[in-house]
């Protein structure tokens, strides 16, 4: 299994549109064989958050407030490649992609592939070459 982390710089003025985009992609990943772990959105309101320098005062700092992340996993690279082929022909994918091209709700994104280290997992981890 491997996990994809996508980090978005979102447009605060278009958080509602970003939520629609995120909801659509959660469905699409599940529809084509993946497990979506959710999107984690910036707060819409203001609230007190703990200091980010809690454990390592000399290293910790507050991150930007316009970041959203998504995490989803596939059992294998082969299943991820099948997902990529199938999803590009999906009408819902085409619709949300065109909608974001016409009215962007995020400024940029970065995609990182990770190997999960999970608690209580007795299965040996596989390393994938990307």
Image (cartoon, rainbow, N blue to C red):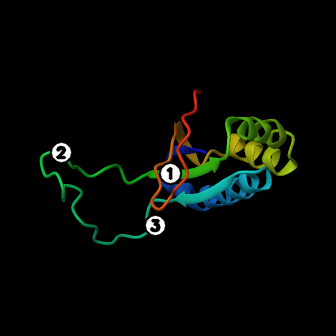
Between residue 31 and residue 124, name the one nearer to us.
Answer: 124
Residue at the far left in the pictured view: 58
Q: Which mark is residue 44?
A: 3
> In the image, is residue 46 above or below residue 78?
below
Q: Position of residue 7 (x, y in %)?
A: 50, 44
Q: Is residue 96 toward the left or the right of residue 116 in the image?
A: right
Q: How many marks?
A: 3
Of tags 2 and 3, the one toward the viewer is: 2
Cα distance between the residues tagged 1 and 3: 15 Å
Using a 10 Å C-alpha cutoff, classify the residue at mark 3 as few (fewer than 14 neighbours), some (14 to 19) or many (20 or more).
few
Indicate the secondary structure of the residue bearing disc 2.
loop
Using a 10 Å C-alpha cutoff, classify the residue at mark 2 as few (fewer than 14 neighbours), some (14 to 19) or many (20 or more).
few
Q: Position of residue 129 (x, y in %)?
A: 57, 27
Q: Which mark is residue 69?
A: 1
Residue at x-position 86% and y-position 46%: 90
Can you tell which quarter of the image residue 54 is in?
A: bottom left
Image quarter in which the N terminus is found = top right
Q: Earlier in the sequence, mark 1 or mark 2?
A: 2
> In the image, is residue 86 above or below residue 54?
above
Of tags 1 and 3, the one toward the viewer is: 1
Cα distance between the residues tagged 2 and 3: 27 Å
Q: Which mark is residue 59?
A: 2
> In the image, is residue 44 above or below residue 32?
below
| For the residues bearing labels 1 and 2, Cβ distance under 8 angstroms | no
Q: Earlier in the sequence, mark 2 or mark 3?
A: 3
Q: Is residue 101 toward the left or the right of residue 118 in the image?
A: right
């Amino acid at each position: 299994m491997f996990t994809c982390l996508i980090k978005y710089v979102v447009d605060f003025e278009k958080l509602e549109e970003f939520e629609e985009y995120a909801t659509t992609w959660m469905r699409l990943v599940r529809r084509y064989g993946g497990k979506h772990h959710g999107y984690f959105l910036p707060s819409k309101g203001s609230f007190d958050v703990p200091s980010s320098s809690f454990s390592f005062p000399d290293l910790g700092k507050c991150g930007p407030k316009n970041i959203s992340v998504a995490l989803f996993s596939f059992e294998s690279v082969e299943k991820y490649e099948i997902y990529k082929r199938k999803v590009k022909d999906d009408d819902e994918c085409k619709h949300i992609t065109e909608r974001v091209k016409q009215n962007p709700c995020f400024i940029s994104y970065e995609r990182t592939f990770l190997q999960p280290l999970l608690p209580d997992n007795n299965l040996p981890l596989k390393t994938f070459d990307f």
